[in-house]
Image (cartoon, grey):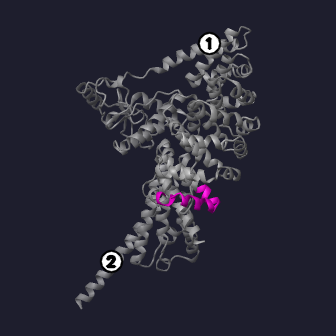
Amino acid sequence: MEETEEREGNAEQEEEEEECDAVAVVGEIQHVIESVVQVGEYRRTQRKESHVLARRFKHILPLMEDLRDLQNPVPQNGVVWLRNLRDALLLAKELLKLCSQGSKIHLALEGEAVMIKFQKVYEKLSQAFDGVPCDELGISDEVKEQLELMHVQLRRARRRTDTQDIELAMDMMVVFSDDHDRNADSAIVERLAIKLELRSFEDLEVETVAVGNLVRERKGQQAESTQKIIGLLNRFKRVAGMEETAIVLDGDPAMPNKMLGRSTSLVIPHEFLCPITLEIMTDPVIVASGQTYERESIEKWFKSNHKTCPKTRQPLEHLQLAPNCALKNLIVEWCENNNFKLPKIYTSSCQEGSSSTENQEEIPSLVESLGSINLEHQRKAVERIRMLSKENPENRVLVAEHGGIPPLVQLLSYPDSKIKEHAVTALLNLSIDEDNKKLISQEGAIPAIIEVLENGSIVAKENSAAALFSLSMIDENKEIVGISNGIQPLVNLLQNGTVRGKKDAATALFSLSLNNANKDRAIRAGIVTPLLELLQDTNLGMIDEALSILLLLVLNPEGRQEIGHLSFIEILVGFIREGTPKNKECAASVLLELCSSNSSFTLAALQFGVYDHLIQMKQTGTNRAQRKANAILDLISKSEQI
């Protein structure tokens, strides 16, 4: 009798604990949903995907309202299901947090890996909705229908095909090439800055903090990828006229040697680095949140109308700064013990003001000399403007404001080859500024630039191609270049130019081929032949660029007809077999498009032995390559069933 009562008492206690556990889990889920709903904005590269996932959270709210006032004890399978749902939502929340607060450059560079994370989240959520114990939980019929609809949507989202921004991927590939001093690269950096929304002082300071957090999280791992991110951040800062960031990686310092003295392999403790600039602090101060920053950096942050802590993003009760004397003493002591020379406090604002004043006086005179009747004066003026417009963003604006663009466009038609070369290069440099792109095209420069591309010197041809690429950042200019017969001379440069000329032509043709009409023009201009030659000449190092353009062309029926020969399929299989990881990825992407359009391409690839290489790629390739390999293998499987 006593044992029976004890068992009944234990059963009641277990039911109460399960019910309390269920209520607690429901509360946790509601808290997760509310925190996600409050997220303000997501990084541009994952914005669409993040908003879609965040909307899924909102759709779960009616279910939580049904469960919030549970009257009956929750069975064990109901508690287990709630926990699984909570875990899936927490995983999704972490991903959305990354897409909201993570480094924009990192999210763009690792776009494919982030997309895989979204797929894993959808898979986890789909599994959570596989077996909802609706009857046991007392869920209403209306909410039950919503859950079934959500389950279908999650399964579709899990199977969604590749949504890579190929233009962004191409830009990232070009900007991370070894040739960092090219003007064309500067135009790409400007374009990336616009795409990633990293142009203003405020955006770049926030990105610096995000990169610093990434460096700390990685703890010296993935050093090559981290160094790429830091390098691109500094290039964005140069375009914006800001001081560059010197970040020290564990075991791989990126600090300039002049700041390291004789200790070139020294690792600076992370706590000595300002979270904003990621440089060693010379005047550390504490803000209201308790975080420490370099005084000058945090003062700039406050002057930008921020009232939050850059690191924690929490509102500050006040903006007063307190010297962190203890930390400063530790930094000084550490520097003395390690023979480390502290950098001088940044004072470039005065220098910039002086330089700007000098240029404001010089540029109007140079613009006036562009119209001089003296040929030598013209040549010197246009050459000087070419150099000034390359140096910094302010000069590009000053040249345009003083009316320098119209006379530069007129000089493109001069018989003097050197003047034409300087003029087209100056316009290339000026076009890095977004407003200047519009002014240059409005002056009717594109046909004149194409003329220089056809008949100018070798350097003039190269820079004309780079200028057309820069101007093609504006979509309407893509069409203008096409109807002005600019595609053919670019194809000619791609086939017959110098190595630099070929690269400039390839970059321009890729951008222009994003326009459907230009795809047709490029195919008619014979672009396929030089692209195939680039694939066979490994010394040029342009295989990825050629494959990226071919990927655009195979989206066009005429392109598939022109490209889809057995010899080309064999070349693609060759890259899948023994190319670099990026080669394999690009080749698989092109092959997938061909096989999706015509099963005969699938059979041809099988004849060249692609199957075993796809199996290997599926296991060891990059994330994107694995996805492409899986998709091609699916097509092979379907073709065998027919």
Q: Is residue 435 above or below residue 352?
A: below
| Position of the C terminus by quadrant | bottom right
Residues in magenta?
A: 592-613
Query: What kind of residue is marked 1?
Result: Glu
Q: Which residue is disc 2 drawn over?
A: 14
Q: Is residue 631 above or below residue 110?
A: below
Residue appearing at x 36%, y 42% in the figure: 216
Left or right: 445 with respect to 68? right
| Position of the N terminus by quadrant | bottom left
Left or right: 531 with respect to 489? left
Q: Position of residue 58 (x, y in %)?
A: 55, 61
Left or right: 579 with respect to 514? left
Q: What number is the disc on residue 362?
A: 1
Q: Position of residue 413 (x, y in %)?
A: 74, 21
Query: What kind of residue is marked 2?
Result: Glu
Q: Position of residue 462 (x, y in %)?
A: 62, 28
Q: CA distance from mark 2 to mark 1?
A: 85 Å
Callouts 2 and 1 close, C-beta under 8 Å: no
Q: Secondary structure at mark 2?
A: helix
One can see residue 155 in this view: yes
Residue appearing at x 30%, y 31% in the figure: 265
Residue 548 falls inside the magenta stretch? no
Specify the principal SS of the magenta part. Answer: helix
